[in-house]
Image (spheres, rainbow, N blue to C red):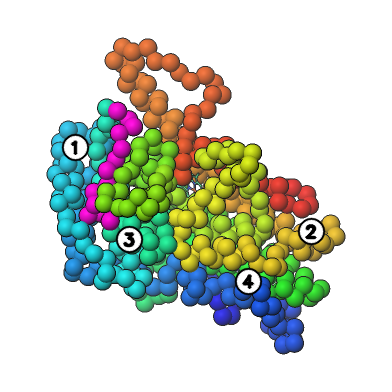
Amino acid sequence: MSTPPSPTSSGGPSSPRRLPDNHFLSIPRPTFLAPRPPTHAPDVSTLAGADYDVDVRTGFMPPSPPLMHLPEEYAPWQKVLDDAVRSELRVGDKRDTTGADIDKAERWRAHVRELAIISIDHLQRNILLLRRAHQVLASIMHFYVHSVPPPSDPSTPLRVPAPIAIPLVAVSHELGVTPILTYADTVLWNWDVIDPSRPVDVDNVRCLTLFTGTESEEHFYTVSAQLELRGVEALSIMRSSLDEAFVGDSLAVRRISAYLSRLALVIDDVATVMMRMFDGCDPHVFYTEVRPWFRGSAGSGRKWIYEGVSSVEAATSEDLSGPSAGQSTLVHALDVFLGVDHTSHSHSASTPTTSLTRAPTFLQQMEKYMPGPHQAFVHNLSSSAHQIRPLVLAQPAGSELTLAYDRAVLALKRFRDSHIRIVTVYIVSQRARAEREAREEREKAGEVVKRRAVGEQADIRGTGGTQLVPFLKETRAATLRTVVGKKT
Ligand code: HEM
């Protein structure tokens, strides 16, 4: 990022205001104090830039709308995807999916198996085409694996046919991302501007639906895209703060304090944007129609076999999660920048651990689902020689810097409060409703059905395979533990 925008004193989700010209943050530093990193230190001078695929205006989203078409040679992929959407394929293990739905899906699946295996040679070195290819192939794969009825033996592997598996693994390799549908496919690479004469901003994007064509699905993706755009300012604040941390003098401390206070407002805005979810994404439609398409192989009890793929490559496609906004680099970056330590909860996440190994946290596990350059961004941020938290801890309690730091951390905690409210409405309550309806149906048929005891919680899993309620509460608790002063 070449020039960070000045932090502003206030502003709503999409209307940051400028600082007055005489504000101390508007005064340039004397040039002899300009930070110059030592050659052995990681370069934190540009947290945005081509190397990380981060844009000064759009952050982790590409600066212009992603391609929606592939060259003619790849038209067969596009056609089978369009056919799946047009024929309104239904998830195979839903109670109301009919035999006719299953037959229709099977006819479509046969076309997928009969596709020729197309080389990705003509996509290579063109990142825009590779992204579109990943999105198309991963979407076809999710339609393919989820439109079949459940097998009689629930551990029967799911086979992804070679015409999809081979190019998907190859394209994923080029992009440094996993061969499964990711947050990048559903959000970062899945949008267009509403009004092309206006810049890309929070209120000028919409996402192009893929699975159900419902307004709820489109809104679900669009809110995440809007949130990414509102978060762009946080990236420039991080960069400016790290530059100042390198200098580390008293002026730097004052400046970082102002940046962190501004960051708190930006994070609150990001949370406000997230709550727009309620404006257009119906919780029941989301839970019953949209979310089932997202499921990955992790935690499903079924192995997904990528046919025609070498055993080495196949190892990278085992136990993968479906898309989750938990793969958003923006939120990871905020955690890393503020020094939120999630390691203590790794035991309650999906990966088992032994006393000799420390399991990666959920957030670390999610990094491999991010595009390669964004993973590099997070690594660079976390390996920066000049971190904010140690600087804060070195200040006296109640100082301007510690107060500002806590404001930012508490804003992130409030973001997680809001997120838990969303998850409660969109998943926990919907799951309870689905169970109640299934029970009533069975009771109507004369069965005696055991009810869950009061206080007994369902084992509800996220698309990332976590036990989501304890996981999200622990993630929030880790954020609160990061506060250095009063935890309110
Ligand atoms: C209807 C809307 C949403 C639902 C139902 C939802 C659901 C979930 C679930 C179930 C998890 C647990 C991890 C997993 O197993 O996948 C999760 C994690 C997460 N989600 Fe969401 N989410 C929603 C919207 C969002 C949005 C818009 C964002 C913003 C980027 C977001 C950011 C995160 C993050 C960062 C995590 C990791 C845990 C954390 O850092 O607190 N989610 N979400």
Residue drawn 66% across and 59% down? 338
The three-letter code of the residue at mark 4 reads Pro
Q: Does mark 2's beta carbon lie closer than 8 Å to ligand 1? A: no
Could you tell me which secondary element the residue under label 1 belongs to? helix
Q: Earlier in the sequence, mark 2 or mark 4?
A: 4
Numbered disc in front, either 3 or 2: 3
Q: Earlier in the sequence, mark 1 or mark 4?
A: 4
Give how far across and how far down residue 375 sits, in percent.
51, 62
Give the extent of the magenta segment: 153-166
- C-alpha gap between disc 4 and disc 3: 30 Å
Give how far across and how far down residue 474 sits, in percent.
62, 41
Could you tell me which secondary element the residue under label 3 belongs to? helix
Numbered disc in front, either 1 or 4: 4
**Which disc number belongs to residue 170?**
3
Residue 72: quarter of image = bottom left
Give how far across and how far down residue 451 sits, in percent.
45, 18
Query: In the rendered image of this protein, does residue 337 appear above or below residue 310?
Result: below
In the picture of the structure, the residue carrying the numbered disc 1 is 102
In the picture of the structure, the residue carrying the numbered disc 2 is 393
Could you tell me which secondary element the residue under label 4 belongs to? loop
Q: Earlier in the sequence, mark 2 or mark 1?
A: 1
The three-letter code of the residue at mark 3 reads Ala
Query: In the rendered image of this protein, does residue 79 appear above or below residue 41?
Result: above
Q: Is residue 51 magenta?
A: no
**Which disc number belongs to residue 42?**
4
- C-alpha gap between disc 2 and disc 1: 60 Å
| Residue occupying the far right of the picture | 396
Q: Residues within 10 Å of mark 3 (few under 14, many from 20)?
A: many
The three-letter code of the residue at mark 2 reads Leu
The answer, for residue 431, to whether it is visible in the render is yes
Q: Is residue 162 magenta?
A: yes
The three-letter code of the residue at mark 1 reads Ile
